[in-house]
Image (tube, rainbow, N blue to C red):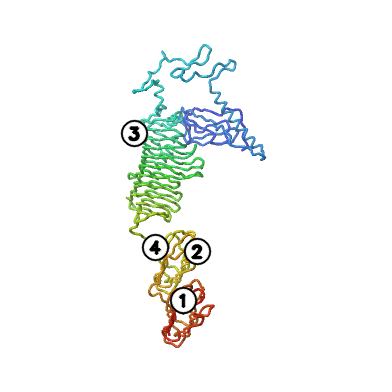
Amino acid sequence: MPEHIKMPAVTPVIRYLADGTQAVFVYPFPVFTADDLSVFLNGAPQAFGYTVQNAGETGGGTVTFATAPASGTVVTLERLLPLERVTDFIEGGDFSARALNNELDALTAGLQQVSRYQAQMLRYGDHETPGDVVLPERSLRAGKALGFNASGDPVAVSLAGSMAAPDFTATGTGAVTRSSADKFGDLVSVRDFGAAGDGLADDTLAFQKALAAHDHVFVPDGTYLIGNTVTVGERKSLIGAGQKAVILCQSNGFAALELSHGYARIENLRIEGGAVGILLQGREGPCVQNNVENVTIWGAATGIKLDGYSDPAKPCYWNNFTRVLVAQPGLHGFHLTLSGAGDTPNANRFHMCRAYSLGADITGSGFYVEHGALNNSFIDCEANVKGTAAACFRLGAGSSKTLLVNPYAESDNGVPNVRIDAGSEETSIINLTAQSDGAAIYDLSGGNFDAVNAGYPDKNRLRRTAVTDLKATLMRFDTEYIDTPGAVALDLSHSVHLVSADGGAITASLPAAASAAGVSMTIKKIDNTANIVTVAETGGPGPDGSTLLLGGENDYVTVLSNGAEWFITATSRMAGNTRYYDGTGIYDIDMAVDVYLLSSYGGALTARLPPANAAKAVGRVITLKKTDVSVNDVTVTEQGGNGPDQAAQILGDQYDAITVASNGSQWYIVSRFG
């Protein structure tokens, strides 16, 4: 392809009369991108069903239809560009020939487009002096025809005596008289554009032409067969007569209706078949503030689909759905997803919407928020699906801040009422009626949801909550059992930790106090072995500024973080907080229990106290007692110090005992026996 296209002197539009077999049509003028070429069938714009080849070529290219247009159809290929300039040359930047050529090409293409519009206008001849080209004032021309006076200038001419339909005047005070033509123009029907509504003739073009010509189109009773997607564009309305106004898809290979822009409305229709009943995506502009109301969709693969699509500047936000029934969907009833690089569908509202299998197989879910954020809300909605479904309501990995209020879920075969996938965040479920025999809430998100009167067996699940005044008749604490030797990092998922050191010593590290402001935790040693449970802090000094040792069965500590450090609020030294040791040599007192029963039967034993200023010693009182009948001494000393009362103390006879206390500078004898 050349570096830039040339702009030949050619009108940027061409028309063909289809013969029913030709599927490839040539456009003999250049287009910059495929989106610059607009395709019309009998004047109706087409959004799907064709591909554009050779965009960017000077000589033009071809358009290939998936299905050859019917015989007698006028096929129009036109280059339509937005008359805008969104680029700019940078001050002091490179000034390339290619950039300049592209700018001039775009200007030339725009001028050709304007020139074509002017060629279609009524105008004075080149050799005639122009007269008055201003229309008579609105008040003078209302209800009249346009004529010409003796000078050939436009004037308003009375319709009196001309062949015209009778005037129309509504009943009631203040009604004004209008022409019948004016009255009939209030509401345009698809039948006005050739729709048969017999379920046999293809009415696709009739819908497309009606919506291209008018903003509000009525669909009377009838069955309207369509073979391609009907796009309801910006600020357009498609309103039916009710459930006898049926749009029937020829196949399930396309979406029946597409909302490609914003502020559109679909009401009072029945849609049958299609890959999607109603597709919302920001293809032409931001897909926002659309309304779908009193619509039923039967037998579509997916009933309603919201797609974030490919452009973040054209999001799928703030759309509203009220009293919508999706019956017998094959895949999903309602589906929020993201197929390209756009934004997720956000802040959409579903009220009194229902997905109902009616015995038909469904492989997906009644409601599936695969992608979506910022309060997509489903209020008073029902998913009654067959047991082949993945879930009644499903919150996918790309969902966050989804709200379910008064949802009703029903199925069988173990189908979950609500499924929350891993990665889903901040789901809220209120007043769930769970009639499926599967899990009320099948949670794979790790508890990243809140529930009020929802779930089983716990109907309410609240995460971080501030309460100023609470009256509780019963409180339950989430408890964790730990029995793995070594280091264990405690997290904020449990408030009570039952620790068994039966297999070996365990160090349970509290989370950093800064990450747990206001959190209270209890750690309890439940085994009767001599293995120590050490309570420490990740990245910090520990409760009350030091590690804490739980050495006896049923020893516990309750701690509270103020955001800066952990404080001990309660602890215990239970009856039997005693250790028996039989050995020789040096035995270091670890301060884990209050009473040490020592046997030196096999040889002399030195019981060595920790330094008096050690954190685990300050303020502690312990007792050491010799229990054996041997003549071997038990000598009580101090690591790096002189010992109790500044000397080593000898326990020489059976039942000799000494009780000592540390004030942080030295060990003192409190009492002695023997």
Q: Nearer the viewer, mark 1 or mark 3?
A: 1
Tag 2: residue type? Thr
Tag 4: residue type? Thr
Instruction: Please give the label number shown on residue 210.
Output: none
Place residue 470 in its image quadrant. Answer: bottom left
Residue that mark 1 sits on = 661
Residue 660 picture location, percent across and down: 46, 78
Crowding at mark 4 (Cα within 10 Å: few <14, some 14-19, many 20+):
few
Q: CA distance from mark 1 to mark 2?
A: 30 Å
Cβ atoms at labels 1 and 4 below 8 Å apart: no
Place residue 525 in its image quadrant. Answer: bottom left
Residue 591 picture location, percent across and down: 46, 74
Q: Nearer the viewer, mark 4 or mark 3?
A: 4
Crowding at mark 2 (Cα within 10 Å: few <14, some 14-19, many 20+):
some
Q: CA distance from mark 1 to mark 3?
A: 93 Å
Residue that mark 3 sits on = 244
Residue that mark 4 sits on = 479
